[in-house]
Image (cartoon, coloured by chain):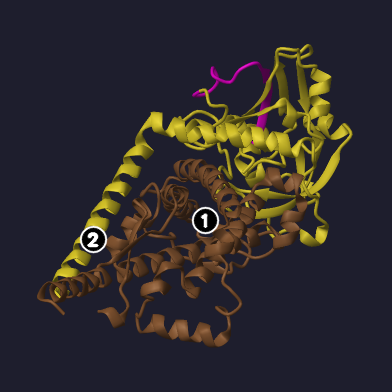
């Protein structure tokens, strides 16, 4: 072997090693997902906080067809409800809270409808969100839970798609909590109750619907807390950038590190 | 390396906290901006149109006696306690008259006895307060539509305004409310003089209150004194169609 051939071979191997260690960049989220995500984030924050303002007007939860101060409450949240920093506006203002709530509730419904339409047609739901039968096998689930508890997140190929706990959380919020919140929200409307009495029967009364609406909203708040924590733990720059520009650097696996 | 990552994380956390703080302060400022509040208020028109389209002439659900709230709570004014009201109440409202006027062909003055002599309707319905609570009560009264048919509103009439004997806050204008003709002629819209088979108690609006079942509690004006048919609402009170509407609440309270 001549000297120049050996040099070329050495060059190639160095180049190969460099390519292998260079981070792989993929396009993680489509333009529609990214846009709808941020509109959704804005709307959800505003409806949650204005919702707490509305809740504070009577910070008691009831179950059944009637529920008012002479009746026994299921739960009381403090004497005055949630603290001012959690409500919109930050001072007690039911009328203003309702305006924020209903305006952004309409916007949230429109945004969610676009999201569903897009995600069902594009195959996003089937391809990326619905867990496969092997993923929800108990052994796999337990394995994933154990990895999450040790804060070990997927790398390499596995990091390119959502893991099963992530999928279940997203599916739970999109297909269980969101429809439940919308339906119970509409059940609190005396106007719509006249048109659709089955709504009231379904939830066992307006006070029950209000309790479910509140509980489901709190679960969404818990989801957001975990979602943000996961973004921070998984690498906030990379994760946030992937939702703004779509660029996502695939975290390298242990073998290549 | 690790130190740098944590610095970045801290930066991100602090940055998000600062951003969140700014966002909230911004929302509070927007809550005080009348023009932005008008933008938010535009959702009410959408709600009104959507609900009118969906609910038509449907009736509010009527419950049975078994569903009644053990105690039907009151809210807002519980005792108007002013000279005129106290005098009327002193002799069981015998001198009380409901005036029906405005854009009507035949203005009326109706006594409580005259109202009781008219064909009555009884309904057990749920009362939903804007604050979030609900109570179920049994109401007896005259359909507002029957009274209006007697008074014969003219073609220009578009709203029914209800004036009350109470002032929720001293020298802040009397309580009043208004509804459109769709709700005014709805079969369950009553001028109610009885609650749970007893004459309407004072905290619930004696001697007469409105029931407009498909809307929230603040529309159900109590201590009624006068009903006026009008073409527009902007010249009454502060112009928004009701005491609470003048203070930022929706005129259409269907949700």
The tag on residue B165 is none
The tag on residue B12 is 2
Is residue A57 something one can see in this rendering?
yes
Chain identifier of the residue bearing label 2 in the image: B
Chain assigned yellow: B
Task: Give the extent of the magenta segment.
Answer: B221-238
Q: Residue at x 75, y 14 (%)?
A: B104
Give yes or no for residue B235 being in the magenta stretch.
yes
Q: Residue at x 58, y 45 (%)?
A: B78
Q: Residue at x 63, y 51 (%)?
A: A188
Chain assigned brown: A
Around disc 2, counting alpha carbons within 10 Å, would you say few (fewer than 14), some (14 to 19), or many (20 or more)?
A: some
**Quarter of the N terminus of chain A within the rendering:** bottom left
Around disc 1, counting alpha carbons within 10 Å, would you say few (fewer than 14), some (14 to 19), or many (20 or more)?
A: many
Q: Which residue is mark 1?
A: A58
Q: Helix, strand, or loop for circle 2? A: helix
**Quarter of the C terminus of chain A within the rendering:** bottom left
**Residue B133 figure quarter:** bottom right
């Amino acid at each position: 072997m001549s000297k120049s051939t050996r040099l070329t071979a050495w060059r190639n191997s160095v180049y190969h090693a460099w390519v292998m260690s260079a981070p792989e960049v993929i396009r993680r989220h489509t333009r529609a997902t990214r846009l709808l995500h941020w509109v959704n984030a804005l709307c959800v924050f505003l409806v949650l906080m204005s919702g707490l303002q509305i809740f504070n007007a009577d910070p008691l939860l009831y179950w059944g067809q009637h529920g008012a101060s002479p009746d026994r409450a299921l739960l009381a949240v403090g004497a005055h409800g949630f603290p001012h920093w959690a409500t919109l506006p930050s001072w007690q203002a039911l009328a203003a809270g309702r305006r924020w709530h209903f305006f952004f509730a309409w916007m949230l419904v429109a945004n969610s409808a676009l999201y569903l339409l897009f995600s069902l047609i594009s195959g996003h739901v089937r391809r990326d969100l619905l867990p496969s039968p092997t993923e929800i096998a108990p052994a796999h689930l337990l394995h994933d839970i154990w990895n999450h508890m040790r804060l070990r997140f997927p790398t390499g190929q596995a990091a390119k798609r959502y893991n099963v706990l992530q999928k279940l959380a997203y599916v739970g919020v999109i297909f269980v909590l969101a429809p439940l919140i919308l339906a119970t929200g509409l059940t609190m409307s005396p106007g719509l109750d006249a048109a659709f009495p089955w709504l009231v029967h379904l939830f066992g009364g307006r006070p029950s619907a209000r309790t479910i609406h509140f509980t489901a909203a709190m679960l969404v708040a818990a989801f957001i807390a975990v979602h943000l924590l996961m973004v921070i733990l998984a690498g906030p720059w990379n994760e946030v950038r992937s939702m703004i520009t779509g660029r996502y650097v695939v975290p390298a696996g242990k073998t290549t590190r | 390396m690790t130190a740098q990552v944590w610095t970045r994380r801290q930066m991100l956390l602090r940055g998000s906290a600062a951003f969140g703080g700014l966002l909230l302060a911004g929302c509070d400022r927007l809550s005080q901006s009348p023009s932005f509040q008008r933008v938010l208020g535009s959702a009410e028109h959408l709600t009104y149109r959507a609900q009118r389209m969906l609910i038509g002439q449907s009736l509010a659900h009527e419950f049975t006696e078994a569903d009644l709230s053990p105690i039907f709570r009151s809210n807002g004014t519980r005792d108007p306690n002013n000279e005129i009201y106290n005098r009327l109440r002193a002799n069981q409202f015998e001198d009380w008259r409901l005036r029906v006027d405005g854009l009507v062909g035949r203005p009326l003055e109706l006594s409580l006895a005259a109202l009781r002599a008219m064909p009555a309707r009884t309904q057990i319905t749920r009362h939903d307060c804007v604050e979030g609570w609900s109570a179920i009560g049994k109401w007896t009264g005259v359909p507002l539509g029957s009274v209006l048919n007697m008074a014969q509103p003219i073609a220009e009439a578009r709203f029914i305004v209800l004036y009350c004997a109470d002032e929720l806050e001293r020298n802040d204008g009397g309580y009043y409310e208004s509804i459109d003709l769709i709700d005014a002629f709805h079969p369950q819209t009553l001028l109610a003089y009885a609650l749970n088979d007893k004459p309407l108690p004072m905290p619930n609006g004696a001697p007469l209150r409105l029931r407009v079942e498909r809307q929230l509690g603040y529309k159900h004006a109590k201590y009624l004194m006068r009903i006026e048919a009008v073409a527009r609402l902007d010249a009454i009170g502060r112009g928004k169609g009701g005491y609470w509407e003048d203070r930022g609440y929706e005129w259409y309270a269907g949700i």
